[in-house]
Amino acid sequence: MVSDKSRAAAEALCELARRGGQGPVPIQEVASGRDLPLHFLEQLFGSLRRAGILQSQRGVKGGYSFARPPSEVTLLEVVETVDGRLGPAAPDPDPPGCMLPWITARDALASHLAEVTIADVQELDERVKDAPMFHI
């Protein structure tokens, strides 16, 4: 239900949140920080900028920053910006019974993604990165 493209966008936004405390971050730094292809990230960030999630600044000290705090950007916004709406534009008022489990799953996913922000994911990313790793 959520594409690799959306997951890459969320990962890149986590990296931007991690690096972006002091102003715009060059897109190359975000790409190298998460090992994402630069041209792919340029496309994603263009969409996120047009949606009002990011802002860009040109020039020597240019780059990308959040248009609003990462704590206000939900994963649902990111997914729907990159991939389009999770559900149909006009839901069927009387869906066939065989579709109900899929509709329920879609609605549950959308509800969960609407509650999780980029700041939440970035915080989780930091905790996991700092956790001790046990190898067996």
Image (cartoon, rainbow, N blue to C red):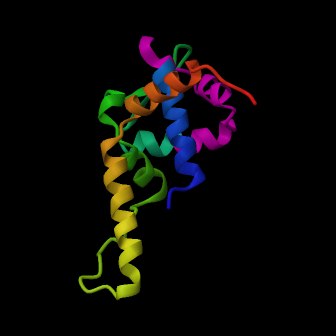
Q: Answer with left or right where residue 132 lies relative to residue 52.
A: right
Give the residue displayed 36% in from the left and 29% down from the top. Answer: 70
Q: Answer with left or right where residue 67 lies relative to residue 83.
A: left
Q: Position of residue 78 (x, y in %)?
A: 42, 46
Q: Residue furthest right?
A: 136
Report the span colored magenta: 19-44
Q: Where is residue 20 in the image (x, y as percent from the top left)?
A: 46, 18
Give the residue displayed 68% in from the left and 25% down from the top. Answer: 134
Give the image quarter of residue 52: top left
Q: Position of residue 49 (x, y in %)?
A: 43, 39
| Rendered view: 11 above or below 94 | above
| Rendered view: 98 above or below 55 | below
Give the image quarter of residue 130: top right
* Most common secondary structure along the magenta stretch: helix
| Rendered view: 15 above or below 7 | above
Q: Which residue lies furthest to the front in this view?
A: 136
Give the residue displayed 56% in from the left and 14% down from the top. Answer: 60
Nearer to the camera, 105 or 89: 105
Nearer to the camera, 49 or 91: 91
Q: Answer with left or right where residue 94 lies relative to residue 77.
A: left
Q: Does the magenta stretch include residue 73?
A: no
Q: Position of residue 23 (x, y in %)?
A: 44, 15
